[in-house]
Image (cartoon, helix red, strand yellow):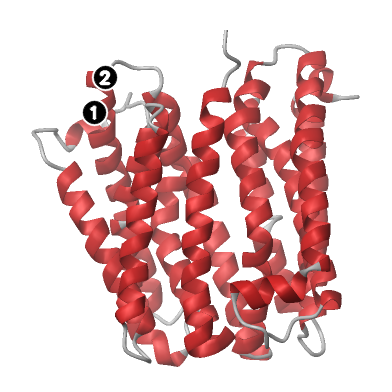
Amino acid sequence: MTPPGRHLLPQALGVVLIGLVGRALIDKLLALRGGAELVAHWAQLNSMIDLVAGVTLAGIGVGLTGRVAGVSPSDQRRLLGEGLRLGLAVSGASLLVCAILVAAGVLDILPPSLAMLALPALGVGCLTVAPGLYSGWLLGRSQPGHAMLLAAVTLAVPLAALVIASRGDEVVYLLAAQALISLLLTLILLRGDHSWTASFAAGHELRPFIGASLAIGILSPAATAFARQQIGATASWETAGAMQALWRSSEWITAIAAGLLYAHFLPRMAAATDAAGLKRELRRAAKQVLVPALAALAVLWLLLPQALALLYRDDLPVTRFDALPFFGGDALRMLSWIYLFALFARGAGRAVVIGEFLSLPLFALLLWLLPGPVELFRIGLCWLLAYAVYAIFNAVALRRQQPETVRH
């Protein structure tokens, strides 16, 4: 019998790689046109989008992928329609709350020049629920080719818009392109006679994932946007862009690691029924994912000037010394994910939610408390400290969740 999750490995890698290449191309074009500042501005708008889309995709999207794999083809189509309606309702509520916060001046994470794009970005976030859920649905049906094609199309349209955009209007064109492709897909998927009320029935399969969606989908993008805003306000948007460049460069490694852990090791951890089985999967994940990722981070650090010049341009204000704490934090982040997926496998929802406060939100808090000048290296130290705390918490939480299963 094929081990759980093995068939998901190539499709997860393919979708992740297409996403990485597309985002890298967008960042490259933005950097060539407006430097690190324009890259940071687009990243802030993306955080606004994620505030709305993430509350659906982080939990309901993952749940949809798992549920679809175990039902008949007719039920698969029903789940897609009901999941989309449920997701649009949840993200719509998030859009409304965020819009009120923006109007009240509480959610003030954009520079003044982009303030008028806050509400459009939130609207795009609601629309991008459809491509995200459809991709998860395709993965659940074991259709990696279709999922990769969807990823390519949803990235090609914004890229084309960016190429034809006039100088100064790049982010407007990107938002409009995302809105167009997402709206078309939303309308296509909503066709049919499915009832909205069925999506909110008390026993609906996807309702249990709403809590995880809210915890993960809101905290991470909100904390990331706040951190960039804090850096932009206290240091400069160029510094915020330099941090974003370091994140994007190491994301080629961390995102692939996350994809492998999700697609391959999470099902295997969930299938482990005794202490020896879980310990084997934890060690295997460390050996097959973490160790190669650490080696890749070391190579990236050695070739950092060339990598940044390739991905962005050769005058970014980033040195290898600046990158050290960031890459150290990335290493701890990937370690924490091994424990995190084991917590998911054990159904430790409360620990997952509490831990969310000790990752990106803790990083944002440390930046806010940081005394003295906000320099890139000191920002990296905050990143390193936050993920050291997060990794320790996840490890301890896993030991306490089922001590007889996870203690070595």
Residue at point 41% right, 40% down?
61
- SS for tag 2? helix
Residue to which mark 2 is pinned: 73
> How far is mark 1 from mark 2, CA to CA?
7 Å
Residue at point 77% right, 63% down?
300
Q: Is residue 149 left or right of residue 23?
A: left
Q: Height in image: 173 above or below 400?
A: below
Residue to which mark 1 is pinned: 77
Q: Height in image: 94 above or below 115?
A: above
Q: Quadrant of residue 249?
A: bottom right
Residue at point 11% right, 41% down?
191
The type of residue carrying mark 2 is Pro
Task: Please say whether residue 296 is visible from this viewpoint.
Answer: yes
| Pick the front one: 6 or 82 | 6
| Pick the front one: 249 or 333 | 249
Looking at the image, which residue sits at the far top? Answer: 1
Residue 192 numbered tag: none
Q: Is residue 242 left or right of residue 75?
A: right
Q: Are marks 1 and 2 in contact (CB under 8 Å)?
A: yes
